[in-house]
Amino acid sequence: MNPRQILIRDLLVLLAFAGWALALPHYASEFIVSVGLSCLMYVALSSSWALFCGSTRYMSLATSAFFGVGAYTSAVFLGQLSWAASIALGAALSAVLAVVIGAAVLHLRGTYFAVLTFGMTELIMHAVTYVEKRYSGTVGRVLTVVPENDVIYLTVLLLAVLAVLVSIVLRRSRFGLALLGIGADEQRAQTLGVNTRMVKTAGFALTAAFAGAVGAAMAVRWTYIDPHTVFNPFIGFQTVLIALIGGAATLWGPLLAAIIFSVLAESLRLQFPQIYLMSLGLLLILCVLYLPGGLASLRWSTLTGWWQGLRQLGRRERTHV
């Protein structure tokens, strides 16, 4: 397939996914719609995370920070601003925060970058907690102005579709190629004329904008928020796990993994939370060992190769016996 055909195929797949998600509330139960909303949330988070981190190979653990900033922006300003303006403001403030954090830590790589972004998340959570206790006299906030559930669902659906659409477009642009060049060899990209600092900062801010917008939209779902809820590190960790297991370097891997894990989460988390967490860890280990490209790289030839390997192993065992 040539690049034009691949682009048309990706757009048609995205259109089919959007149509299915749009029709879901009209025939499914409230529980299924709730699962769908969680799925769309992680599609937006993991797809936008993979756009930057999957290309540059920077392991960011700051998703929870941007999500929480967006959630608190919605909680504070929703009464004074419209719904769309609150979402946009949450995205903008998260992007500005990403620029500030990026200026401090984007020169690092690997473990140092991951640890520092996680530390920044904890710092922001405790700073928000201090400000709330100091000036508001309380830790949490009750959201009195809450839109209809249909509005929330459509907003998160729009953000999920937009995150995938941006990934489709940027992966074919000079900006996307610059991100890939940074991931392959950052020093070589610099010698080829890529302003790596600006590209990394812009990519990091784009990821943060989506996380902030999703946080602003999902905050009203809870109606009451506090720092430990919206800055929960598990949101960031699960976003990273979904992207890695699905295939962070692929377009459709995060979306596929987000659907799988949303169903697993709602099926197991309440009744068997330990089994759910064990399944997350087991899938991550299996993908790292046997499917480093993620679920999106799974092909029929891969399955047949595994089967042939098992048969050969069985023959060796029989010959030794």
Image: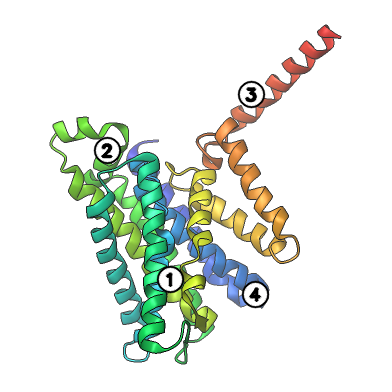
x, y percentage for residue 164? 40, 56
Q: Earlier in the sequence, mark 4 or mark 1?
A: 4
Name the residue: 48% across, 74% down.
218
Q: Is residue 190 above or below residue 105?
A: above
Name the residue: 41% across, 69% down.
126
Report, in whole angstroms, how far the alpha carbon at label 3 lies from the one at label 1. 42 Å
**Residue sitting nearer the eye, 274 or 202:** 274
Res 267 quadrant in image:
bottom right
What residue type is disc 3 on? Gly
Report, in whole angstroms, how far the alpha carbon at label 4 lies from the one at label 1. 27 Å
Report, in whole angstroms, how far the alpha carbon at label 4 lies from the one at label 2. 45 Å
Name the residue: 36% across, 51% down.
116
What residue type is disc 4 on? Tyr
Quarter of the image containing the N terminus? top left
Residue identified by numbered label 3:
305
- In the image: residue 288, left or right of residue 120: right
Q: Is residue 188 above or below residue 110?
A: above
Residue identified by numbered label 1:
215
Residue identified by numbered label 2:
182
Quarter of the image containing the C terminus? top right
Disc 3 is placed on an element classified as: helix
